Image (cartoon, rainbow, N blue to C red):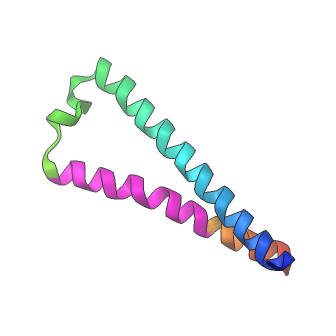
Amino acid sequence: MSTRASILLWSAGSGMVLGLILDALICGAWMVASNFLPAFSPRALPRWATLASIVALALIPIVAGLIGYLEGRLKLS
């Protein structure tokens, strides 16, 4: 693997890892909030809101990986 490809891969990978950490923080904050505010409980949400939450949580690492890739391209230019 060339140096350029390695830089791009590591930048995108680190972005995805940061996105996963952000997902974990969001899930943790939601669990703490649902203990104090029962309206935030996953059982209180309609199905469409639950589905939208899952899609949003899945998109965070993908977008973070894309931003990391773009950062890697910026480093190489």
The percent position of residue 59, horizontal first and vertical second, equals 43, 61
Please identify the quadrant where the N terminus is shown.
bottom right
The percent position of residue 28, horizontal first and vertical second, equals 44, 31
Q: Which residues are magenta?
A: 48-66
Q: Is residue 27 magenta?
A: no
Please identify the quadrant where the C terminus is shown.
bottom right
Tally of numbered discs: 0
The quarter of the picture where residue 65 lies is bottom right
Q: Pick out the residue farthest to the top.
A: 36
Question: In the displayed structure, would residue 60 be above or below residue 26?
Answer: below
Question: In the displayed structure, would residue 23 be above or below residue 11?
Answer: above
In the image, what residue occupies the spot 69% across and 73% down?
A: 70
Left or right of 65, for residue 25? left
Q: Is residue 50 magenta?
A: yes
Left or right of 72, for residue 15? left
- Chief secondary structure of the magenta portion: helix
Question: In the displayed structure, would residue 11 be above or below residue 49?
Answer: below
In the image, what residue occupies the spot 66% across and 66% down?
A: 12
The percent position of residue 3, horizontal first and vertical second, equals 86, 76
Question: In the displayed structure, would residue 77 be above or below residue 67?
Answer: below
The percent position of residue 21, horizontal first and vertical second, equals 56, 43
The quarter of the picture where residue 45 lies is top left
